Image: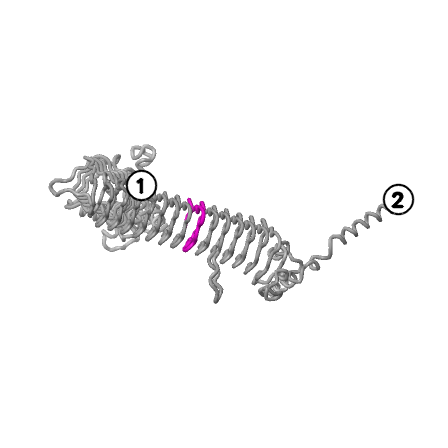
Amino acid sequence: MGKLRQFAIMLAFILAGLAAGPAWDQRLTPQEAWVLQQVAKGQVADLQERFGEDEGGRTIRGWFMEALLTGKSPGLKIHYHGVRLRNAIVSDKIDLASAEISCDVELLKCVFNNVVLFRDSNFKKNLQIKNSIFKKEANFLRIKIEGVAYFNGSTFEGAVNFNQSLINKELSFRPYDPKGVVPIKSNFQEECHFDFLKVGTNALFESATFQGPVHFRNAKIDGTLLMQGATFDKVANFSHSKIGQTANFGGTIFKNNAHFTRVEVNEDLDCYEAKFGKNALFAGVKVGHVAKFVKAVFEGLVEFDNAVISLEFLAKGSKFTNCKKPISASGLKVGSIINFEGAVFEGPAIFAGSSVGGQFNAGGAEFRSKNATDFTGLTVGQLAKFTDAVFCGPVDFAGAKIGGEFKADVAQGAVLEAVRIKGQVICHDALFFNLTISGADKHPLEIFQLDLNRTAVESKLSLENLHIQDFLAWNLQVKGQTNLRQVKIAGKADLRGSKFASLEIAQTQWPQRENLDLARMTYQFARIEEGKLTWWKKNIEYGLLARTPLLEWVERSSYYKRNYLDLQDYLNRTGQERQADEAFIAMKRWELSNWWGGLGNPLTWPTLVFWDLGVGYGRKPLRIVWIALAFVIVGAVFFKPQYLEGVDWPVNQTLRRLALSLDIFTPSLFNMGMEAKWHPPKTLGLQRFIFIHRLIGRVFTALFFFGVWEYFR
């Protein structure tokens, strides 16, 4: 019975092996075997060219595609050209979840009849699936592609998921453009997900068609996002996305809601001739250069609330056709120009609290709503132009601030109420091209509080003939010239974090140290002119001692080490090395004065006497030489050369005294052998003087070398 049982088990194994079929390579179809041969040779495997147009002759199986792309086909060594396959039909599911594909993949005019699953896969090189058809779901969730990803001219009949994918180079869904044939556009027929997508360069969707909802939330495109000529039939959501260069939606058609809330575009946002069928939401959008909506059409609610456009907002000839839903641009901030020339507003227009550094141009615009057109709190740096504009209802400019000209030709109902705050000039968080606040020479303008906190001035800031109680300029940024002339600040001056390109101060009085704060203030060029200088300041302090008005200004403020280092760097950069050394010494002196009780602590005195006064903290090593010379001269007075034996040089007695004093002062540095041949009377006073002379000489020599080392270090 035991042998019979063993035989039965052995027979079962044999039958199971036969049921498993032939070896892997014997199970391949002729098409698949031919594909392996072509791939091994590095040639294109065009199944239609080899087996004809019949679908059966072009069909390969999903498991074969998986083994081919991962290189797991037995005996297959993929050529460095990678896998290049054309006109293939994949019959069943492709499951490459978490797979690693190390070769280039190029699939052209392929049809995927079942689910394509690339979730968490890693393509070490390029992935190109052009002019192909995905019949069912295409799942690219968290896919990583280290090269380019091209899907030009492909059609996706099922859902598409690129959520959290990472494309190191370019992602493209542009039209496939074969020679002599009309370009084939990419088409998405179901819902598409691109949330948290990351692309290293450009993401190109030119002329693509999206028939289902599209989600691009929190996507990050380091290059250009190209959507020019695309069509969105359902909701398109780009909220919180970041575009490293330009976002181009020129001629794009949004048939449903378009969400661009808090999108960040480093360069241009281009929606030239775009059409928005329903709501267009751009609240909180940030654009680094220009936002273009020229000749755009908006049929629903439009929101630009709190949007930030660094340069220009261009909407010339645009049309807002919904008579009930407004265009809301409350808090819109634009650096240079807002242009609505010839625009048509069928519904309410709200620009309350908006600001523009240069021009607001609505010349020839038509405001057809009977509701009030709201410009309350509008801030314009240079020119507000409403020439030939038509207002069918009231227009409200209450509280508006127009920095330059105001040109208006208002038909009816204009309300222009300028608000004036007595005693205060408040410009915080404002953006100006030029800002000038000045009084008369004999009658300075008195301001209780001048508030320029977080204000940005693109060109020139000029403050002249002012008496200010509190000057608040925290994080003030001026990219051009800044002039402060004949300004007196009595109470508080706060310039923390301010940035100046060119700063010139003349005849300005600053408050005391506890009320002057310059922490983190930076500048590219700075100069302080004090008017008529006394002989002491001109020749001794600024000449001999190499101090500067800038250093005195920094010393007058609350201590912040970075201010001294920035001043030192600026003085070195402008060729004022001596003055830079003085700034460094002043910084060290301030630190010493605040260490363990400051200069009242005897422990700080040696540092002050020797390291500070002696060598200027290593910045003035030659200073100790001049002090040492004084000691040498004093020694020459007391050291008489007649006690020298066997020394007859120098002949001149004065020089001989100096040489003897120098030899005793620095025997290790200038060993002239005179000290050994000098035999003076051994009086107690003389011996003490010689000891002190030698000791000071050794200390000064050490300080000199330490100072030189610190200087060159």
Q: What element does badge 2 sit on?
A: loop
Which residues lie in the magenta part? 216-243
Q: Which residue is mark 2?
A: 1
Q: Which residue is mark 1?
A: 330
Is 257 placed left or right of 682 in the picture? right
The image position of residue 479, as x and y in percent, is 28, 49
Q: Residue at x 20, y 43 (%)?
A: 412
Please tell me which residue lies in front, 56 or 430.
Answer: 56
* Occupied quadrant, residue 492: top left
Does the segment drawn in magenta span residue 237? Answer: yes
The image position of residue 681, as x and y in percent, is 28, 43
The amino acid beneath tag 1 is Ser
> Which disc is residue 361 wearing?
none
Q: Quadrant of the N terminus?
A: top right
Please tell me which residue lies in front, 417 or 614.
Answer: 417
The image position of residue 656, as x and y in percent, is 26, 52
Farthest residue toward the left?
442
Does the segment drawn in magenta span residue 193? Answer: no
Q: Earlier in the sequence, mark 1 or mark 2?
A: 2
Alpha carbon distance from label 1 to label 2 = 94 Å
Residue 74 seen from this side? yes
Q: Residues within 10 Å of mark 2 (few under 14, many from 20)?
A: few
Q: What element does badge 1 sit on?
A: loop
Q: How many marks?
A: 2
Magenta: main secondary structure equals: loop
